[in-house]
Amino acid sequence: MARYELKLPKMGEGVIEATITAWVKNIGDTIAEDETVLEVATDKVDSEVPSEVPGILIERFYEVNDVVKIGAVIAIIETDAEIEEENDDIEIIENPEIEKIDNESTENTKNIETDKILSDKNTGRFYSPLVKNIALKEGISQNELDNLQGTGKNGRVTKNDILRYIKAKKSGKTVEKQKDKTVEQSAEKIVNTVAQPSIITDNGDEIIEMDRMRKLIAEHMIASKRISPHVQSFVEADVTKIVNWRNRIKDDFYKREGEKITFTPVFIYYIIKAIKDYPMINVQLDGTKIIKKKNINIGMAVALPNGNLIVPVIKNADTLSLTGLTKAVNDLAKRARENKLKPDEITGGTYTVTNIGSFGNIAGTAIINQPQVAIMALGAIRKMPAVIETPEGDMIGIRQKMILSHSYDHRVVDGMLGGLFVKRVAEYLENFDSEGLL
């Protein structure tokens, strides 16, 4: 049996230490190759630390909340596997001559020298040494690696992920695509370079450093405003029928389904119907190519207890009934607030809905969630005086009304499409018919 030293790996440029947030494995536990042993956090990224060898965890040198230097030995794993001599130069980004890892990788490394393979300094994304080793041997460029969707925690690329990608690539089933990392990089550059007025602090002012999620949100918002020329259209909708219907059925629905039915899934249900009527709202833009999405995946903005925002996605939302949408909305919102979402549950959205009415806001101009081209903000439902047309003549009555605010990307969505779409949503809401809905 050999003793393998598990060290805290590099985690990006400028990161010299990390805090242990959780031990996934305890003393005596069996560990598979590339299986997570512990979780760590830095000011840039939260990551899992996997083992490069199978074995048994026999020693741990740090506890939860301990701060550990990069490269420090954090645990010992007893293994039957052959331990290769450690190569501290695995991230060869400055040396123009990348040394081969073994004789079989010579040609591959020659092909990727100019790509500066395996540097995660620009992206801040964590890759285990095992994944890096495989990528280097197989000639996987940094761009491909950054574009590879991982199944590990927070989207981490596992050994199985990269092996599946390599197999698919060799069979000709994948096409390398440029991941739009320049968006985040440009956004960060804008944040750092745009001239801002001098900040003067007074005694008693509290200075709060953004957490990692807030920094990502800030960059994403700046990038979206830079990428997409935003246009807004507003429509007022009379939702009296929906309000009365929900008040009438909500208790029975809860008894039958064990779920509370809110207005959000009802609105999403009719937004989906409008998307089917106007499918060019459900598109994405790749340069000058418009990608018309087959699936309708609805993102729903969720405010978190710490004040941040996350957008879980209801995949294939058009295949769900109103009851199914209700359960999906409640489930995703609950797990979002509990920080229990899986990485693939916050990706792949094709259209986003944000319910600003839950905060008492009557209207808002939401920022598009890239790479989508539109987002709808749902305003608060209010009792309003309104003119009601009757056979006997017009009269004033009290109606439940709300404002739908539609933001869209003017590169591909003009005022006619953007305006007709939100008008169609309003028409569906006003012509609400509960027959066969549940």
Image (tube, rainbow, N blue to C red):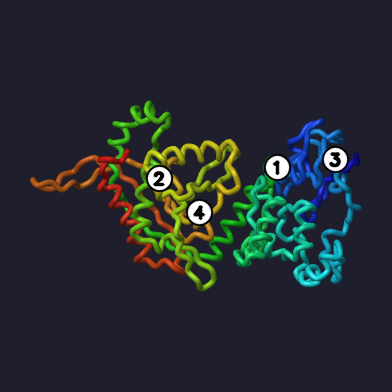
Within 10 Å of disc 4 (Cα), the crowding (few <14, some 14-19, many 20+) is many
Res 194 visible = no
Q: Which residue is mark 1?
A: 203
Q: Which residue is mark 4?
A: 349
**Residue type, numbered disc 2:** Leu
Within 10 Å of disc 2 (Cα), the crowding (few <14, some 14-19, many 20+) is some
Which of the 4 image quarters holds residue 75? top right
Q: Are marks 2 and 3 in contact (CB under 8 Å)?
A: no
Q: Are marks 4 and 1 in contact (CB under 8 Å)?
A: no
The CA span between labels 3 and 1 is 42 Å
Q: Earlier in the sequence, mark 4 or mark 2?
A: 2
Q: Which residue is mark 3?
A: 74
Secondary structure under tag 4 reads loop
Q: Are marks 4 and 2 in contact (CB under 8 Å)?
A: no
Q: Which residue is mark 2?
A: 320
Q: Residue at x 69, y 65 (%)?
A: 143
Q: Earlier in the sequence, mark 3 or mark 4?
A: 3
Q: Nearer the viewer, mark 2 or mark 3?
A: 2
Q: Nearer the viewer, mark 4 or mark 1?
A: 4
Q: Earlier in the sequence, mark 2 or mark 1?
A: 1
The CA span between labels 3 and 4 is 39 Å
Which of the 4 image quarters holds residue 383? top left
**Residue type, numbered disc 3:** Ile
Secondary structure under tag 1 reads loop
- Image coordinates of residue 100 in percent, x first then y, are 86, 65
Q: Nearer the viewer, mark 4 or mark 2?
A: 2
**Residue type, numbered disc 4:** Gly
Disc on res. 393: none
Q: Earlier in the sequence, mark 2 or mark 3?
A: 3
